[in-house]
């Protein structure tokens, strides 16, 4: 009887064009899919060829995989081209000597900025605009230089992993934003106007391509600064894996603090069993416990 009734309902549903949900008993196939299996990796916003070319300008003449000495060599060559024009612009020998000393000093400054993050010893950069871009004890190192030619006022940080360049962090000239519009909304408008739409999350915009990834970072609140980071996604996988493998274990809460806060609520005394414990301690001292009212 029940079977016939179910078939009648099914036929009626088909005739009226009604959905068949609930007309048949639940089966293994109709069980709800767990939320975790429904989750998909976020889709990367496509980057056009034009915007990819604009983003690639952030390489600044350098390439991923370069050694520290190769980066310094490219920088020195760039200075040669820049100072050649200045040297040609004057016939004053003293002025020419001064320009040559300036160039030599710039190269020496870049060389002197090299630092290895190999030990647990604090570095001058542990609290800085690049504090989140490196870790200690993971074969990472860095060079840093000012880029103030052509009216710019920005800094470029070169990050190396196992001696190879894999990331550059450019602290931008703040003049790209009007003083009264230093907000992430304005920053995003400027960045996407130049590089196209990206994936926005919090105070960060990300553009992804097979060859490189670029992050535009809002650091206005912490450092009154804005930055662009270009990195090698293949090397990034290795860096992140090593950082996770070498991450220090979470610090244990001291036994004294545990006794006070009991974070897992598992260290409760047995009230019934220990109800007379205080009285016994008092008696042991040769006095009588106070009488309860």
Image (spheres, rainbow, N blue to C red):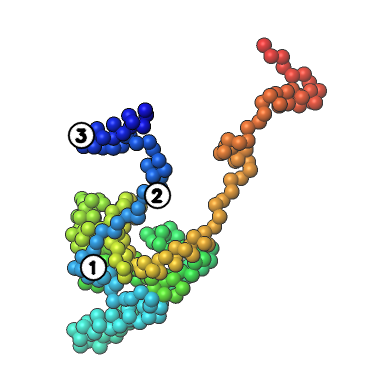
Give the image location of residue 129, x and y in percent.
37, 59
Q: Is residue 81 left or right of residue 251?
A: left
Name which residue lies at 60% across and 41% down. 257
Give the image location of residue 284, x and y in percent.
80, 26
Compare residues 166 and 280 and report the one nearer the observer.
166
Q: Which-is-in-front pick, marks 1 and 2?
A: 2
Of the residues under marks 3 and 1, which one precedes in the sequence? Answer: 3
Whole-angstrom CA distance, mark 1 to mark 2, is 33 Å
Q: Quadrant of residue 191?
A: bottom left
Please state the total of marks drawn on the protein image.
3
Crowding near the residue tagged with mark 1, few <14, some 14–19, many ≥20 C-alpha atoms within 10 Å: some
Q: Is residue 282 left or right of residue 265?
A: right
> Label 2: which residue?
37
Residue 21's label in the rendered image is: none
Name which residue lies at 63% across and 35% down. 267
Give the image location of residue 209, x and y in percent.
29, 66
Q: Quadrant of residue 59?
A: bottom left
Whole-angstrom CA distance, mark 2 to mark 3, is 34 Å
Using the image, determine if residue 98 lies above or below residue 129.
Answer: below
Using the image, determine if residue 233 lies above or below residue 257.
Answer: below
> Label 3: which residue?
16
Name which residue lies at 21% across and 65% down. 48
Residue 224 visible in the snapshot: no
Residue 46 visible in the snapshot: yes
Where disc 3 sits, the SS reads helix
Residue 52's label in the rendered image is: 1
Compare residues 21 and 275 and report the one nearer the observer.
21
Crowding near the residue tagged with mark 2, few <14, some 14–19, many ≥20 C-alpha atoms within 10 Å: few
Cβ atoms at labels 1 and 2 below 8 Å apart: no
């Amino acid at each position: 009887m029940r079977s016939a009734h179910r078939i009648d309902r099914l036929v009626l549903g088909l005739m009226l064009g009604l959905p068949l949900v609930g007309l048949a008993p639940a089966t293994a196939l109709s069980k709800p899919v767990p939320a975790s299996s429904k989750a998909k990796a976020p889709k990367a916003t496509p980057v056009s060829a034009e915007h990819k070319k604009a983003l690639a300008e952030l390489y600044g003449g350098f390439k991923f995989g370069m050694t520290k000495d190769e980066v310094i060599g490219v920088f020195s060559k760039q200075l040669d081209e820049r100072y050649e024009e200045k040297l040609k612009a004057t016939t004053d020998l003293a002025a020419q000597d001064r320009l040559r000393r300036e160039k030599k000093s710039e190269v020496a400054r870049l060389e002197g900025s090299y630092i290895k993050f190999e030990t647990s010893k604090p570095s001058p950069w542990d609290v800085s605009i690049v504090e989140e871009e490196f870790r200690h004890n993971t074969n990472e190192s860095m060079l840093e230089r000012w880029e103030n030619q052509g009216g710019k006022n920005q800094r470029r940080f070169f990050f190396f992993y196992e001696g190879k360049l894999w990331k550059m962090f450019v602290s931008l000239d703040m003049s790209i934003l009007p003083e009264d519009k230093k907000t992430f909304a304005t920053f995003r408008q400027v960045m996407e106007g130049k590089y196209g739409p990206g994936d926005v999350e919090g105070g960060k915009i990300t553009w992804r391509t097979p060859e490189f990834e670029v992050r535009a970072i809002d650091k206005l609140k912490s450092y009154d600064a804005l930055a662009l980071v270009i990195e090698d996604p293949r090397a990034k996988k290795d860096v992140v894996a090593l950082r996770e493998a070498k991450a220090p274990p979470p610090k244990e809460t001291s036994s004294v603090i545990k006794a006070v806060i009991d974070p897992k609520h598992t260290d409760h005394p047995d009230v019934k069993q220990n109800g007379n414990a205080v009285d016994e301690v008092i008696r042991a001292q040769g006095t009588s416990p106070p009488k309860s009212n």
